[in-house]
Image: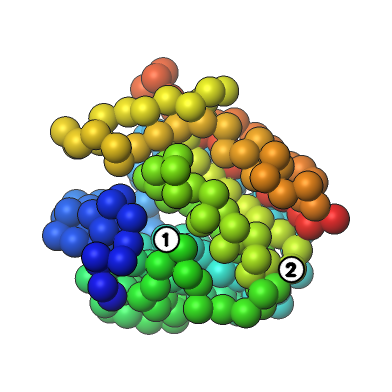
Amino acid sequence: MDASSLPKQAAAWSSDFGNAYVTRNPQSIEEIEQLYAKDYAVSRRSMNEAFLGSLDRSIRILEVGANIGSQLELLRQMGFTNSIGVDVNAFAVQESKRLYPEVKVIEGSAFALPFADGEFDLTYMSGVLIHISPDDMGRAMDELHRTTKKYIWGFEYYAPELVTLEYRGNQDLLWKRDFCQEYLKRFPDLKLVKEQKYPMTDGKNVSQMFLLEKA
């Protein structure tokens, strides 16, 4: 992928900076669940069940910013096997094949998804919008909205107003806000199905999970 055509943040995640993220973060489902237990005192599996447990397991799902595919693997273990992920980092895509061979992740950008309008029943990002500049965020949201025919699901750091944070010594790589409301303001055809805030055990941050449906 030509990084020169990407926004600054996406270019950073496609580079060695993104490779380092892949390497330092949990690789196995067990490690991921240990991290959620530490950070939220609740498992990611239980979050997923609370939001998606009633959905038909045959639905087609797209994850944008899938990294190594661990979230897709968690969904696969729930029975959601008709899914695909996209990530801007080639090393993450390569590692997904090694670590989670039963899920599919391809290289691609959130700003130009290689899929038709309404190709999926559910599209989602998990911890990705927080790393997209407010100037470019709408473009990524547009692509998730364009490619889903029914649901948009999200999990991101929450703040009632836009907050810019430093990320590993870097500026302009991390933001938090009410992403659920941003979707609802941007797309009048969306309605809220479910929303829950998960306070982090550090006492400093809150994450928000939400499920939206096209009317």
| Residue 88 locus on image (x, y percent) | 34, 66
Q: Nearer the viewer, residue 3 or 122?
A: 3
Other-residue count near label 1 (Cα within 10 Å), few / some / many at <14 / 14–19 / ≥20 = many
Residue plotted at (48% across, 27% down): 162
Task: Give the vertical position of 122 relative to 193 (above or below).
Answer: below
Left or right of residue 189, residue 10 in this image: left
Looking at the rendered image, the quarter that the N terminus falls into is: bottom left
| Nearer to me, 47 or 83 | 83
Res. 38 mark? none
Image coordinates for residue 19, horizontal then vertical, percent? 19, 61
Element class at badge 2: strand
Which disc is residue 149 wearing?
Answer: 2
**Residue located at (41% from left, 18% from top):** 203
Q: Secondary structure at mark 1?
A: loop
**Picture coordinates of residue 115 (x, y %)?**
56, 78
Q: Which mark is residue 65?
A: 1
Rendered image quadrant of residue 4 = bottom left
